[in-house]
Amino acid sequence: MAVQLQNVVIDSADAGKLASFWAEATGWERAEWSTAEEAMVRNPAGVNLYFMRVPEERAGKNRVHLDVGAGPGGTAGEEIARLTALGARVLERHEGNTVLADPEGNEFCVTAD
């Protein structure tokens, strides 16, 4: 028997605002019960994103980060432009991926086409 991964939990200053960003970024639904204290973005095909408000400020580099790619028919460049319009910012560009930060500074990568 093995465990089934249910949620990736991300500490945040405002869970509701960060969930709204990721709901727009992924196209997934934000749970109706979401608040500034805790929020969820539901993945219809698997692992959800769960945001929890914590009192501590973010310190240092992420120990875990998300890798995302463009959806069908899209390109990495188009996704980077869309995500920055939603509030992300580009941190580094590498061959094969671009490192961005969400509105609270959590790093994630957009992988190449």
Image (spheres, rainbow, N blue to C red):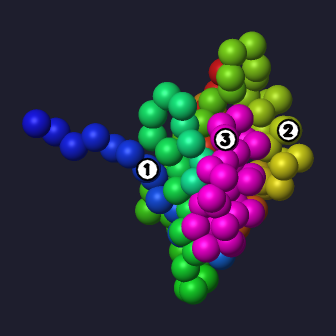
Q: Is residue 65 left or right of residue 80?
A: left
Q: Quadrant of the C terminus?
A: top right
The residue beneath circle 3 is: 29
12 or 29, nearer to the observer: 29
Res 7 seen here? yes
**Mark 1 or 2, nearer chain start:** 1
42 or 89, nearer to the observer: 42
Residue 109 forms part of the magenta stretch? no
Q: Quadrant of residue 94?
A: top right
Pinpoint residue 107: horizontal percent, then vertical percent. Answer: 61, 57
Q: Whole-Å distance between the Cαs marked 1 and 2? A: 27 Å
Q: What stretch is highlighted in magenta?
A: 14-39
Pinpoint residue 109: horizontal percent, then vertical percent. Answer: 61, 44
Secondary structure found at label 3? strand
**Mark 3 or 1, nearer chain start:** 1
Res 66 seen here? no
Secondary structure found at label 2? helix
The residue under label 3 is which amino acid type? Glu
Q: Residue 81 carries which label?
A: 2
